[in-house]
Image (spheres, rainbow, N blue to C red):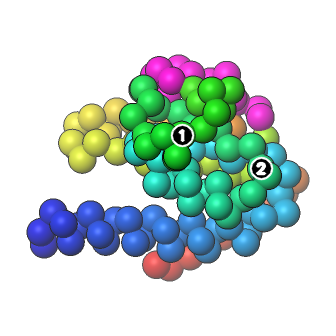
Amino acid sequence: MSRLDSFIRRLTAQRDILNSIIDLVGETPGPVLEFGLGNGRTYDHLRENFPGRRIVAFDWEVRSYSASTPAAEDMVTGNIRESGQAFVGIGAALAHADIGTGHDEIDAVTLTWLPQLMAGVLAHDGIKEGRYFLYRRT
């Protein structure tokens, strides 16, 4: 598969997954967190689908298009592993992360800390842990 086809497939999957989640979290209070702003495509999609909701984006530095860049108070720069810790307990309705590098050894390190960060920033749903499980075949 060409790199172009792979890129298109990845972005299509990302959009389709986000669109399926939007209705699930629509009534859940709390901000939306975007780990990995990049050039702002996903941020722009989230902003369009969550109008009026605070969306906080994280990245090493701001490299997004100006129209797809959050306000300064909603843009967190620096190491996401470290800066994200300040948001643990915020009760986010949705946290999206697209911070993969495509290098297996680097991404393996990210997977040692990212799941715990994601769980820490998300709102609790009030269901006793281990009581119910949701599986979805894709």
Along the viewing direction, whichever of 111 and 91 lies nearer the viewer: 91
Residue shown at the point (34%, 45%) measured from the top left:
100
Whichever of labels 2 and 1 marks the residue nearer the N terminus, that label is: 2
- Which residue was labeled with disc 2? 53
Q: Position of residue 104 (x, y in %)?
A: 23, 44
Q: Which residues are magenta?
A: 77-90
Along the viewing direction, whichever of 69 and 7 lies nearer the viewer: 69
Is 117 drawn above or below residue 129 in the view shown? Answer: above
Q: Is residue 81 visible?
A: no
Q: Amino acid at mark 2?
A: Arg
CA gap between label 2 and label 1 equals: 15 Å
- Which residue was labeled with disc 1? 69
Q: Mark 2 or 1, which is nearer the eye? A: 1
Considering the image in quadrants, where does the N terminus appear? Answer: bottom left
Do residues under tags 2 and 1 come within 8 Å of each other at their CB atoms? no
Circle 1 sits in a helix, a strand or a loop, which is it?
A: loop
The crowding category of the residue bearing disc 1, from other C-alpha atoms within 10 Å (few below 14, some 14 to 19, many at least 20), is many
The furthest residue to the left = 2
Q: Position of residue 112 (x, y in %)?
A: 43, 34
Q: Position of residue 30 (x, y in %)?
A: 81, 46
Is 31 drawn above or below residue 59 in the view shown? Answer: below
Residue shown at the point (65%, 61%) measured from the top left:
48
